[in-house]
Amino acid sequence: MKVLKFGGASVKDADSVKNVANILSLYRGEKIVAVISAMGKTTNALEKLLSAYYYSSGDIDEEFSKIKAYHIDIAKGLFTDSNHEIYSELENIFAFLKTKLLLPNSDNYDYEYDQIVSIGEIISSKILSAYLNSAGINNSWIDARAVIRTDHIYREARIDWTKTVELVKDSMQFNHEKIYVTQGFIGSTAEHITTTLGREGSDFSAAILAYSLNAEEVIIWKDVSGVLNADPKYFDNTIKLDQLSYHDAIELAYYGASVIHPKTIKPLQNKKIPLYVKSFTNPKIEGTIIRSDKTELAIPSFIFKMNQVLITIASRDFSFIAEQNLGDIFYKLSNLGVRINVMQNTALSFSISVDWNEKKIPELIKLLEKDYIIKYNTNLELVTIRNYDNETIERVTINKEILLEEKSRNTIQMVMRDIAIL
Ligand code: ASP
Ligand code: MG
């Protein structure tokens, strides 16, 4: 059996949903689990709705209506019969959401996030499943919350692997069914409270299901032709990587390449399940295959992270930054959920580059300032080059001032800013 994952861009309108049906029909006769993300930019829209609800920072009705209208519109492009049961299903889901929004919120933002934002995946999978059935591609809809068992860490839930494998195997037996349609990104606790696995977590869901079912392969369908050596947003002349080892894929994802969710590879690697990244607009062309392979990635790859803050932490009394301070600093970072993108230490200071976040970073700085001397610069960019050489370094540092540089045999990371041209 194979696991096929379709991201938001692949189901962003009625034509896209039809395209997904075409892709699935290429697999006729095979056992398939289709994992679906929320449609288009629905997750962002639901986050806005949540803010309106939780922080009263917007108009709940307006955000709600936009999301509802967007989905009804897609349904209309797929189901001409206005009595089709999908319409009453959608009405029910939106009525449920509406009721939720009328209740007072709990004081746990992350909990509310998971209850509200998870709806995007429920809706998209309902629409896709119904459309496939109407197009003669028979399938069963599976509620991922009944099979992906997690702990209670809302928005970043961790998987209970033993229980999940058991539940997935139980409910996806392929006895009468060849195709199951389910959601990415969501799961639930043992008490059946909905959780989510982190933004862009649908890739990870596909890997969890593949792991549980010992899939032959996983295919992630994207709007690019495969894994590229740099993000085309920041770089001309990108090259598609035909093959990658699990190791290189993990490294690229770790440094922030937005191709695949970082947690996706490990479960696949454990079971040696190959992962294909392919284009949903060009399903016949070969994409990238990620599999166990000793060969190292020969092509330089570039990962850009914008909006970086470089924070330099020094002790107040000119003492060394040693294990004890480092332990304390890491503890504060992890408590706030701030992830280090690159770090460097000297005798008297410790520097880190982290993603800017308007809530967490000022809080972090305030906290650190109690015990340390803090200097920081915002609006920086971090470039990571895997398999660098002098030429590639020169290429990305034109007109840049480098504030921090970390080099290993394979990888260089540079935190930099534009040189002000006077
Ligand atoms: N819909 C979720 C998000 O946009 C999960 C995903 O697409 O992977 O983050
Ligand atoms: Mg998405």
Image (cartoon, rainbow, N blue to C red):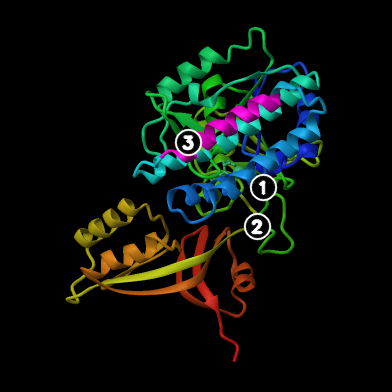
Q: Nearer the viewer, mark 1 or mark 2?
A: 2
Work out whether mark 3 precedes mark 2 in sequence or the reverse, and give the earlier one.
Answer: 3
Disc marking residue 100: 3
Q: Position of residue 362 (x, y in %)?
A: 36, 66
| Residue 97 is covered by the magenta coloring | yes
**Left or right of residue 68, residue 55 in this image:** left
Image point (70%, 21%), residue name: 85
- Judged by its main secondary structure, the magenta piece is helix
Q: Nearer the viewer, residue 101 or 385?
A: 101
* Residue 185 visible at all: no
Image point (50%, 51%), residue name: 52
Q: Position of residue 353 (x, y in %)?
A: 42, 65
The residue singled out by tag 1 in the image is: 227
Q: Position of residue 333 (x, y in %)?
A: 32, 56
Q: Is residue 367 above or below residue 138?
A: below
The quarter holding residue 286 reads top right
Q: CA distance from mark 3 to mark 2?
A: 39 Å
Q: Amino acid at mark 3?
A: Lys
Classed neighbour count for the residue bearing mark 2: other residues with Cα under 10 Å, few (<14), some (14–19), many (≥20): some
Q: Amino acid at mark 1?
A: Val
Q: Position of residue 50 (x, y in %)?
A: 49, 47
| Residue 187 is covered by the magenta coloring | no
Q: Amino acid at mark 2?
A: Asp
* Residue 210 visible at all: yes
Disc marking residue 231: 2
Q: Is residue 225 above or below residue 310?
A: above
The C terminus lies in quadrant: bottom right
Q: Which residues are magenta?
A: 86-103
